[in-house]
Amino acid sequence: MTSQTAQDAQHESFRQYLPDLNTPRFQAIAKNDAYGHAKELLEYHRPPWLYGLYVHWRKLFEEPFKGVTNDGAVRPNLFKLRDEGVPIDAITRAANAVISQLSAEQTARTLLHIDSPEWRSWSNPEFLVSDKGIRLDEITPSLRDSVFLLLETTLSPEGYAKARAAMQINHFLGELVNAPKVMNEHSYNFVLFGVPAVDRPWGFSLYGHHLCLSVFLHKTQIVVSPWFTGAEPNLIDAGPHKGTRILHVEEQLGLELMQSLSDELKQRATVYEKMKDPKMPRGRWNHDDQRHLCGAYRDNRVVPYEGVLVSELAPAQQSLVLCILSQYLSYLPSRSRKLKMRDCAERFDETYFSWIGGHGDADPFYYRIQSPVVLVEFDHHSGVFLSNAEPAKFHIHTLLRTPNAGDYGFALRGQIGPAVEQEYVWEE
């Protein structure tokens, strides 16, 4: 069986794991909207692992922001203000078109200060933890279209297409499990930070199930970090968006890189041989993030380097690393992406590639590429809504962090100076 055929078989097999919709869990979610579903989980039912995670997240949120590091110490001077060619005039116009349609109540919920800690209160599960901003499935079509236009104007064409595909796949999952009011194409919250302008910092956040984007803008420079993109399943096999698939390229490139290594380098890259390995220390696997280390609310996590140095790899293998990073940086507009890729390539002597799981064509796996200027993770998950107890290739989580205070543009903000904003006044 060829590698592509094996992957296609893995993806198509998700239908054998469709859940029993007559169970109490799915009966309850079918009746609820997003708010009722969150109350059911976090106030009434309180599954112990889930409530414990929620409490832990809130404690992490109370910590002052420091940033992801490899040893607990933030390295300075890694990120500089620069011209990245971002079309800030068009992006600002698109943001102001959103603002012009907000009611007074929506304005109060949606326009937050540039230094608001709520930058950090995003999360990727389907249950609503932080209810702020406007929710796209509750607003007028005109306002929703304006939010999408802002997203399209800001991101690269391929990045925008990927984000919209993630939303469509979320809708597909909602249909599969009869939960359309909780999971649909528009079940995402949108928030603005700062006053949109061409000459001072501002940004926005879009977050919901399997898609979370944090965007910071200053003049012609952009930071899209942290972000989370996932899918369960990652292929739509029926309906108007049949054939939509995401995250398979990141999967294929990661596996190609691992399979290209010598036996000695494979052994050094492999941190754990099993996806839930008995050798893992307590906490290395958890119910929500599974093998991920840098998901929601993990803004200050210390993640030691593991695996093999990319500078030790052959030129063709280093090219594969760059191809992987290019996929993870695809939300960025073209010039910004090229500059960030250059930043990453210049740090190959401090860049590590690590792996968990097998590396056969059909094996699920986790990998991480980590350096002082970027950290990306890829993980095959077990079922959350589908019933597969073991990780499967049709449920994928990916994320990107910018270590050393790069997330949310923090490292750049310190070079801009104190945030000075004009107050936005809503007029009826």
Image (spheres, rainbow, N blue to C red):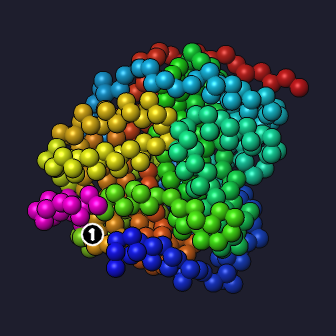
Residue situated in front as seen by the camera: 216 or 165: 165
Q: Could you say whether the residue bearing mark 1 is in a helix, strand or loop?
A: loop
Where residue 201 appears, as percent x and y from the top left, is: 55, 22
Q: Quadrant of the C terminus?
A: top right
Decide whether the magenta segment is chiefly helix, strand or loop: helix
Q: Is residue 419 above or below residue 330?
A: above
Mark 1 surroundings: few (<14), some (14-19) or many (≥20) residues within 10 A = many
Q: Is residue 66 above or below residue 415?
A: below
Residue at 58 percent across and 23 percent down: it is: 88
Residue at 50 percent across and 16 percent down: it is: 418
Q: Which residues are magenta?
A: 256-272
Instruction: Give the residue type at disc 1.
Output: His
266 magenta-colored: yes
Where residue 147 appears, as percent x and y from the top left, is: 69, 39
Residue 67 visible in the shown view: no
295 sits to left or right of 16: left
Where residue 425 appears, as percent x and y from the top left, is: 77, 21
311 sits to left or right of 396: left
Q: Would you identify the image quadrant in which residue 205 lies?
A: top right
Residue situated in front as seen by the camera: 145 or 183: 145
125 magenta-colored: no
Q: Which residue is mark 1?
A: 359
Residue situated in front as seen by the camera: 380 or 389: 380
Residue 199 visible in the shown view: yes
Residue at 24 percent across and 70 percent down: it is: 273
